[in-house]
């Protein structure tokens, strides 16, 4: 017999499975649900306010390719950046994704660190 703990739809079960040989089929034996401490409630902070976008027509917008969390702004507002410099680090699905400048110019951010953004959101403009 081999024992496993399995969680199905939030309920934990202790399962024993018998090995019967090469050709046989393993038949699970399910015991009573295992008591599991309820997870502590997770406080969800309100999304950080997103700064107002830069004035329309004042530079080329750099948009997010995916929803995620703005983990890091790599330059200060008003800094000069070069094409392909990483300007924002976006975290999505626990992976950091660099967002790069689309051209040379002066950067103006439209978001702040810690902000949750959607696909297509303007992260900054480069003029």
Image (spheres, rainbow, N blue to C red):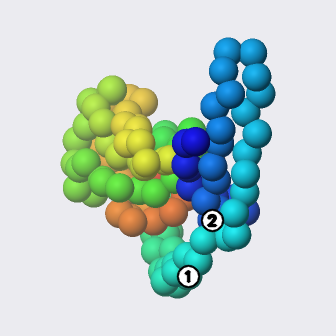
- Depth check: 15 or 98 in front? 15
What residue is shown at x 63% (from left), y 49% (from top)? Answer: 16
From this viewpoint, is residue 57 visible?
no
Q: Please count the marks in the image.
A: 2
Q: Is residue 34 above or below residue 45?
A: above
Quadrant that contains the C terminus: top left
Residue 124, image x and y in percent?
A: 43, 50
Residue 119, image x and y in percent?
A: 62, 47
Q: Is residue 41 above or below residue 54?
A: below
From this viewpoint, is residue 30 visible?
yes
What residue is shown at x 67% (from left), y 70% (from top)? Answer: 33
Query: Of helix, strand and loop, which one carries label 1?
Result: loop
Q: Which residue is under mark 1?
A: 38
Which of discs 2 and 1 lies nearer the camera? The answer is 2
Q: Quadrant of residue 81?
A: top left
Mark 2 nearby-residue class (10 Å; few <14, some 14–19, many ≥20): some
Residue 72, image x and y in percent?
A: 30, 54
Label 2 vs 1, first from the N-terminus: 2
- Depth check: 34 or 116 in front? 34
Q: Which residue is under mark 2?
A: 12
CB under 8 Å between discs 2 and 1: no
Q: Is residue 47 above or below residue 103?
A: below
Quadrant that contains the N terminus: top right
Q: Quadrant of residue 84?
A: top left
Q: How many angstroms separate mark 2 from mark 1 (CA)?
A: 11 Å
- Depth check: 4 or 58 in front? 4
What residue is shown at x 51% (from left), y 63% (from top)? Answer: 116
What residue is shown at x 35% (from left), y 55% (from top)? Answer: 71
Q: Is residue 119 above or below residue 103?
A: below
Query: Of helix, strand and loop, which one carries label 2?
Result: strand
Mark 1 nearby-residue class (10 Å; few <14, some 14–19, many ≥20): few
């Amino acid at each position: 017999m081999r024992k496993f703990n399995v969680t199905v739809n939030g309920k934990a079960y202790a399962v024993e499975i018998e090995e019967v040989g090469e050709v046989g089929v393993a038949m699970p034996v399910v015991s009573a649900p295992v008591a599991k401490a309820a997870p502590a409630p997770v406080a969800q902070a309100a999304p950080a306010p997103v700064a107002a976008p830069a004035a329309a027509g004042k530079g080329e917008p750099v948009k997010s390719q995916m929803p995620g969390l703005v983990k890091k702004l790599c330059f200060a507002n008003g800094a000069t950046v070069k094409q392909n410099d990483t300007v924002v680090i976006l975290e999505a699905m626990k992976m950091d994704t660099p967002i790069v400048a689309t051209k040379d110019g002066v950067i103006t951010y439209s978001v702040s660190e810690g902000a949750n953004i959607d696909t297509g959101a303007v992260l900054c403009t480069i003029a």
